Amino acid sequence: MRVEHHWWNGDVRLGRRDVYVRTDGELWEVEAQMGGPEGKSKVQQCPGKASAMILADAWRGPRWRWREL
């Protein structure tokens, strides 16, 4: 799986949040990660790019200033 998009909320502490959209060319998935690489994460499979982007937008939410890496 390659990372198509990666967003970060800009927090370097325990409040860090990352959202990834990944694909292998056929399958799509979105991962929401809390607390950095050592923290918790949730992965959801999606049927296509459009649904993966919608889910990523929903998981980011409006609370933080997100930056795409």
Image (cartoon, grey):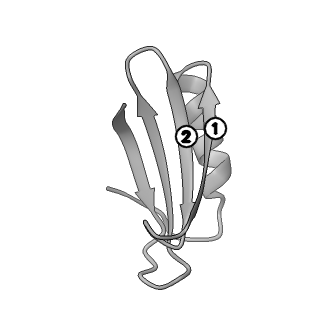
- Dot 1 falls on a residue whose secondary structure is strand
Mark 1: which amino acid? Gln
Q: What residue would you read off at disc 2? A: 30
Q: Position of residue 60 (x, y in %)?
A: 60, 56
Apparent side of residue 51 relative to residue 14 in the rendered image (left or right): right
In the rendered image, which residue does mark 1 sit on? 44
Q: Residue at x 48, y 69 (%)?
A: 9
- Say which of 28 and 66 sits in front: 28
Name the residue: 53% across, 82% down: 14
State whether residue 15 is above or below residue 26.
below
Question: Horizontal placement of 1 versus 34: left or right?
Answer: left
Which amino acid does the dot numbered 2 rest on?
A: Val
Is 37 situated left or right of 62 in this image? Answer: left
29 over 65 or under it: above or below: above
Q: Are marks 1 and 2 in contact (CB under 8 Å)?
A: yes
Q: Residue furthest top?
A: 26
Q: Nearer the viewer, residue 65 or 46?
A: 46
Crowd rating for badge 2 (residues with CA inside 10 Å; few <14, some 14–19, many 20+): many
Q: Position of residue 61 (x, y in %)?
A: 66, 58
